[in-house]
Image: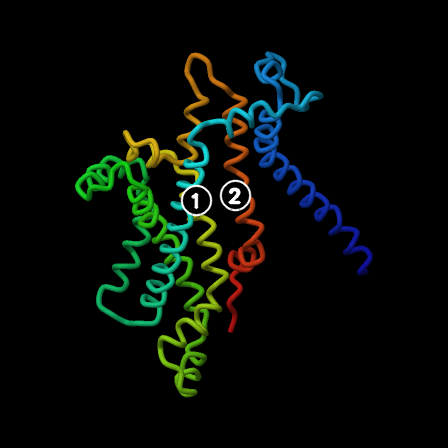
Amino acid sequence: MSFVLRSVRRPWRLAAEASALLIAAVVAFPLYWMVLSAFKPAGEIESTRPRPWTLSPSLDSFRRVFGQQEFGRYFLNSLVVAITVVAVSALIAFLAATAVTRFRFRFRTTLLIMFLIAQMVPVEALTIPLFFQMRDFGQLNTLGALILPHIAFSLPFAIWMLRGFVKAVPPALEEAAYIDGASRTRFLWQILFPLVLPGLVATSVFSFISAWNDFLFAKSFIISDTSQSTLPMALLVFYKPDDPDWGGVMAGSTVMTIPVLIFFVLVQRRLVSGLGGAVKD
């Protein structure tokens, strides 16, 4: 009987695995084409009959990218913005999620609903109001004009996600810590923080990607001081309407992808457990 059940289930399992591989291939193909185009010589990139391989790989596109005068500065600016957004938003989200989960106060439900509504507002609709706000704050042409909006946009999602992790920590654990003489601050950082760390990592990945790949805010808020530009803005150097350098664009995009991959590798274990809800009673 068990053999019959296994034989029935196996085709469905094979079909599911084949579907997963097909979806993975479809998702990965644009990345493959980007990296391939970065190594193709100019003649193959501009060919009217593109091929999914190259027999004469070239580093010319990467030389043009790294030969750009301000490339190192753009890379450093993107790194500063992304790391600052991740660190600040994670700290605020952790404290806010703890507050709205562990404490009862007036308008708590209203505040949570506002967090949910904030995620529904498209970024494009707020770009112009944010521009005037950054101008009034004197933050135009500074990295602060990129950091502050990204922190604000990443907080609602982070707070909602971390709220579930904080709520999953049993109140009995907190009461036991207080009985043993632990202060609220000690419980917060030495007991609660490690338990919700997988959730923090998961939210940090989304915050990092959003800040690292941002083009809209960088284009809108960095107007005249190009020394404050980030990597996505550097790609505009290679994109010209009359004569675009697709090799440079693809090489620059490939370089931009490397820090994201490194970040994923560093946090992949915490990320998997965070997305799966690792906190248990």
Marks 2 and 1, how far apart in space? 9 Å
Residue 196, x across and y down, in percent: 46, 65
- Tell me if 19 is positioned left or right of 62 in this view: right
The residue that disc 2 covers is 259
Please tell me in which quadrant of the rendered image residue 167 appears.
bottom left
Please tell me in which quadrant of the rendered image residue 47 appears.
top right
| Viewer-nearest residue: 264 or 228 | 228
What residue is shown at x 70% (from left), y 47% (from top)? 12
Amino acid residing under circle 2:
Pro
Residue 189, x across and y down, in percent: 41, 71
Is 78 drawn above or below residue 109 in the view shown?
A: above
| Viewer-nearest residue: 56 or 107 | 56
| Viewer-nearest residue: 49 or 66 | 66
- Tell me if 227 is positioned left or right of 193 in this view: left
Q: How is the image coloured?
A: rainbow
Amino acid residing under circle 1:
Leu
What residue is shown at x 76% (from left), y 51% (from top)? 8
Task: Using the image, tell me which numbered label, if any, was put on residue 16.
Answer: none
Mark 2: few/some/many CA within 10 Å (<14, 14-19, 20+): some
How many discs appear?
2
- Tell me if 73 is positioned left or right of 147 in this view: right
Helix, strand or loop at label 1? It is helix
Please tell me in which quadrant of the rendered image residue 112 appears.
bottom left
The residue that disc 1 covers is 79
Is 1 drawn above or below residue 218 in the view shown?
A: below
